[in-house]
Amino acid sequence: MLCQVALAKPEFRPGEAWSDINGDLIQAHGGGILVRSNVYYWYGEDRTPGGQGAVACYSSTNLYDWKRERVALSRESLPLIDGRPTFVERPKVLFNPHTGKFVMWMHLEQRGYHFARAGIATSDQPSGPFTFLKAFRPITDGSRFEENDADRQRESGGTVRDLNLFMDDDGRAYVFYASEGNWTMYVVRLDAGFTGPETPVVENKTWARILVHKMREAPAPFKSGGHYYLITSACTGWKPNEADCAVAGNPLGPYQSQGNPCTGPEAGMTFVSQSTFVLPVLPGRFIFMADRWNPAHLAESRYVWLSLMIQTNGSCSIPWQDRWELSSFEPKK
């Protein structure tokens, strides 16, 4: 019964079935969290079989108990490209204080994974509904690609697959995404509306190639102590692999690997999961969010939430815990 109702005891149980307050499995895969007016909004892929949602939105005031708000972005609102349907992976949302809009970025894809573009949608409310605006590749320079590239990067620019958003303390926003056929990560500063790249687009000034030829995906950026951290996974499809944490003094890099931040059982496989988001809680203390994918039944994929801390030497540490509570973040008396 504990798996079918909201958690009776306020604790996180990484890898176990997690239901909303109505008793339904939470559908927020590959997701991220936005904090607005003391409410947490969790957006993610809605994998409900036969459902109409591409992205679902949940809300919580304590991070344990989640209410399903609505379908934030419907499948029917997604564009047909060349007569073929598109689908969403890894949606993330920022609030833009200048426009008053909630801006969603997503990896927009088609069967075969060659479309590989960013999708943009906006809403006046945190839970939506979001209106789809466009699909594009932020960096259109294709000069480094071959003529016969299967992803048509020569014509359209670097591919966009796994992505994440990050807002710095100065209000500037960035998108991180796996590009160049997943061989290299791109980080791009966004324009004032958060709906495209800052212009003029200048490499190493408004955007940069990072983790070059490292074949990394599932980016989860965060900031601590004036340093920028980026957790990623290797590219092994649905199969879990070893995480890496890289650090830089600037969001555009360069980033230097610190190695695997995970410790404990199955740390070499990121606890049989893959990074999706890092949520700040207190200075130096964060929640590492990951997905334990079930490719045969994606709707039943589990979530792995763990405490992440920055050590006094600046290194990132994510220890395994079967059970844990937010009270562990509080200073010991």
Image: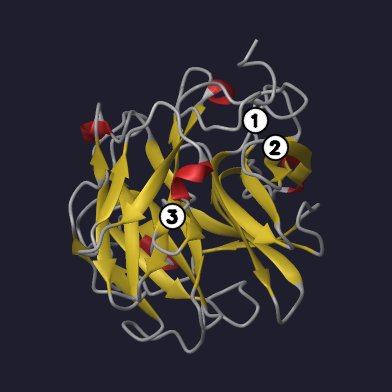
User: Seen in the image, is 59 located left or right of residue 239?
Assistant: right
Q: Nearer the viewer, residue 242 or 313?
A: 313
Nearest-to-viewer mark from 3 and 1: 3
List x then y, in percent, for residue 37. Answer: 74, 63
Q: Nearer the viewer, residue 221 or 46?
A: 221
Q: Cβ–Cβ below 8 Å for labels 2 and 3?
A: no
Q: Residue at x 30, y 55 (%)?
A: 148
Q: CA distance from mark 3 to mark 1?
A: 31 Å
Q: CA distance from mark 2 to mark 3?
A: 26 Å
Q: CA distance from mark 1 to mark 2?
A: 8 Å
Q: Quick check: can you spot residue 130?
A: yes
Nearest-to-viewer mark from 2 and 3: 3
User: Dot 1: within a 10 Å radius of its alpha carbon, few (fewer than 14), some, or many (20 or more) residues?
Assistant: many
Vertical comparison of 193 with 2: above or below: below
List x then y, in percent, for residue 73. Answer: 73, 47
Name of the residue lying farthest toward the bottom: 200
List x then y, in percent, for residue 52. Answer: 76, 33
Of the numbered discs 2 and 3, the one sitting upstream in the chain is 2
Q: Cβ–Cβ below 8 Å for labels 3 and 1?
A: no
User: Dot 2: within a 10 Å radius of its alpha carbon, few (fewer than 14), some, or many (20 or more) residues?
Assistant: many
Question: Which residue does the numbered mark 3 point to in the structure image?
Answer: 331
Q: Cβ–Cβ below 8 Å for labels 1 and 2?
A: yes
Q: On the rendered image, what quadrant is the N terminus found in? A: top right
Question: Which residue does the numbered mark 2 point to in the structure image?
Answer: 66
Q: Residue at x 47, y 89 (%)?
A: 200
Q: Dot 2: what SS? A: loop
Question: Which residue does the numbered mark 1 point to in the structure image?
Answer: 26
Amino acid type, label 3 = Pro
Amino acid type, label 2 = Trp
Q: Residue at x 70, y 29 (%)?
A: 20
